[in-house]
Image: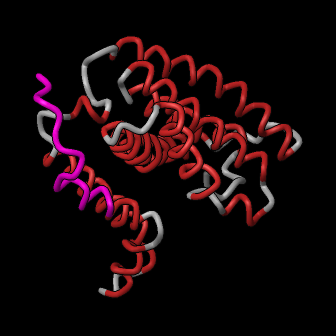
């Protein structure tokens, strides 16, 4: 895709991006409950709606995806970054299982595929497109310095959005998530490509669940 002239900082894409942010604070679930969607379907439908909003935002930004690190530029290097993060999280997941459960408790093999898909779609793909692509890209479009943009998105992704770990007193998991967010943001900015962050996020969630046997409710 050939990049066109940079758009004005304030565009129609702010509407779906804003709805994505509000959705992380319960707006989507509130609307779905308002229209009497059964509880068992809330998570799946909310994930689908997030994908729709991401699609709308990108459609409105057609020709400007480079601003949001969705590009062919440095794709190979970004993919290598993702594979390196995968290798790193193999060790992190192993250590996490020993620190939290006293040893490895393998996820049953028949749960590997659904767990991988859950790590890939709502976590690796949706969250990275929201946080490291749209939000981080938006801050950079607004000329926020790289360091502060990454730190702000990292804090929002870590202690703010994943605040449940603070309430549980689970600072180990919070620390892993926070550090990952900063590294993913740094690599995305360095390569100007979000692909590595998507792979790394998928690996983080899947590999930790693989070694803890599903005994941790959610990441």
Display colour scheme: secondary structure
- Which of the two residues, 140 or 157, is positioned nearer the viewer here? 140
- Which of the two residues, 118 or 171, is positioned nearer the viewer here? 171
Which residue is at a point 69% across and 40% down the rendered structure image?
Answer: 176
Q: Is residue 12 above or below residue 182?
A: below
Task: Tell me which segment is drawn in magenta.
Answer: 1-18
Q: In this view, does 209 lie above or below 166?
A: above
- Which of the two residues, 194 or 136, is positioned nearer the viewer here? 136
Count of marks overlaid on the render:
0
Whether residue 14 appears in magenta in the rendering, the answer is yes
Please tell me in which quadrant of the rendered image residue 28 appears: bottom left
Q: Is residue 87 above or below residue 140?
A: above
- Which of the two residues, 115 or 9, is positioned nearer the viewer here? 9
Q: Where residue 21 sits: x, y (%)?
A: 40, 60
Q: Where residue 192 sits: x, y (%)?
A: 36, 23
Please tell me in which quadrant of the rendered image residue 72 appears: top left
């Amino acid at each position: 895709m050939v990049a066109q002239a940079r758009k004005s900082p304030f565009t129609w894409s702010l509407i779906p991006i804003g709805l994505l942010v509000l959705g992380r604070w319960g707006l989507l679930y509130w609307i779905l409950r308002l229209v009497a969607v059964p509880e068992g379907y809330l998570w799946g439908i909310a994930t689908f709606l997030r994908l729709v909003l991401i699609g709308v935002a990108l459609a409105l930004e057609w020709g400007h995806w480079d601003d949001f690190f969705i590009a062919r530029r440095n794709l190979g290097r970004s993919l290598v970054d993702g594979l390196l993060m995968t290798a790193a999280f193999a060790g992190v997941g192993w250590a996490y299982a020993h620190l939290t459960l006293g040893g490895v408790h393998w996820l049953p093999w028949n749960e590997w595929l659904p767990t991988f898909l859950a790590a890939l779609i709502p976590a690796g793909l949706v969250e990275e497109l929201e946080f490291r692509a749209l939000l981080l890209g938006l801050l950079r479009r607004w000329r926020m310095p790289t360091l502060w943009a990454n730190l702000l998105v990292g804090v929002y992704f870590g202690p703010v959005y994943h605040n449940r770990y603070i309430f549980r007193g689970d600072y180990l998991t919070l620390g892993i998530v926070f550090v990952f967010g900063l590294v993913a943001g740094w690599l995305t900015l360095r390569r100007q490509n979000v692909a590595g962050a998507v792979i790394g996020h998928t690996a983080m969630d899947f590999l930790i669940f693989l070694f803890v046997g599903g005994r941790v409710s959610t990441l």
